[in-house]
Image (cartoon, rainbow, N blue to C red):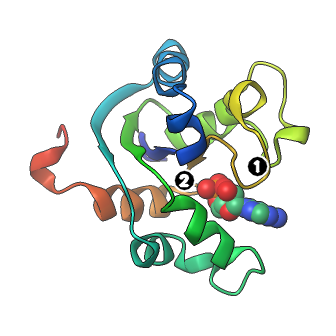
């Protein structure tokens, strides 16, 4: 398994001022931040990022929501990064997220669920490259 994953702090969490608390949970769980930026997606870029969900009923709403305000994008490093990060963030639907997870603490709905985490090593590489050139990340 690769030792990197990719995350976004989504518009709901950014707007609520929870970015610092979320980054603290990420570092305390043993992840190193090896690339990071604040930015805002256009609906078109959000659509490209979430292209795998293009056929889903929530796709249009998701693209509108993800471009509705600033986000923080980051690449994270840790052994077993993808799987361990998905454990740290908790279930997509915060109603099902375990105690102690980022989504349990900060997500407000299945869509406004505070953070994104890559679901595979392959997608982690693709998603990291979507935001960061080789000069914008460590290593
Ligand atoms: P994320 O892990 O970033 O991957 C896809 C996103 O789509 C997900 O988090 C949610 O923000 C959103 N999403 C997933 N399932 C649903 C759903 N059933 N209804 C609305 N939004 C969803």
The residue lying at 23 percent from left, 54 percent from top is 132
Residue occupying the far right of the picture: 95
| Callout in the foreground (2, 1) | 1
Where does ligand 1 appear, by image quarter?
A: bottom right
Graded by Cα atoms within 10 Å as few (under 14), some (14 to 19) or many (20 or more), the crowding at tag 1 reads many
Q: Is residue 112 left or right of residue 26?
A: right
| Residue 115: x %, y % from top left | 59, 42
Left of 74 or right of it: where is 102?
Answer: right
**Residue 97 quadrant:** top right
Question: Label 1 near label 2: C-beta < 8 Å?
Answer: no
Front residue of 18 and 122: 18
> CB at mark 1 closer than 8 A to ligand 1?
yes
Secondary element at image label 1: loop
Q: Around disc 2, counting alpha carbons within 10 Å, would you say few (fewer than 14), some (14 to 19), or many (20 or more)?
A: many
Q: Indicate which disc residue 127 carries.
A: none
Question: Residue 40 or 76: which is nearer the viewer?
Answer: 40
Q: Residue furthest top?
A: 28
First reached walking from the N terminus: tag 2 or tag 1:
1
Give the residue number, with chain letter if any, for mark 2: 118
Q: Is residue 9 visible?
A: yes
* Residue underneath mark 1: 92
Name the spot of residue 80 as percent of width and height, x first: 53, 36
Q: Position of residue 44 (x, y in %)?
A: 42, 79
Please give the name of the residue rendered at 47% of the width and 31% of the height, measured from the top-left corner: 79
- In-front residue for pair 130/32: 130
Give percent across and percent down for residue 74: 37, 41
Q: Is residue 87 left or right of residue 104?
A: left
Report the residue at 9% width, 49% height from top: 135
Residue 45, above or below 41: below
Instruction: Give the residue at x 46% y 73%.
Output: 43
Helix, strand or loop for disc 2: loop
- Residue 10 seen in render: no
């Amino acid at each position: 398994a690769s030792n990197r994953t990719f995350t976004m702090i989504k518009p709901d969490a950014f707007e609520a001022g929870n970015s610092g608390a979320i980054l603290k949970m990420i570092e305390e769980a043993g992840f190193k931040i090896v690339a990071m930026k604040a930015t805002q997606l256009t609906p078109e870029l959000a659509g490209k990022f979430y292209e795998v969900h293009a056929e889903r009923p929530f796709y249009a709403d998701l693209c509108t929501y993800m471009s509705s305000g600033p986000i923080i994008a980051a690449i994270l490093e840790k052994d077993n990064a993808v799987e361990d990060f998905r454990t740290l963030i908790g279930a997509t639907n915060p109603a099902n997220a375990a105690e102690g997870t980022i989504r349990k603490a900060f997500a407000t709905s299945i869509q406004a669920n505070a953070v994104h985490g890559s679901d595979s090593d392959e997608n982690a590489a693709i998603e990291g490259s979507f935001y960061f050139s080789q000069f914008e990340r460590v290593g």
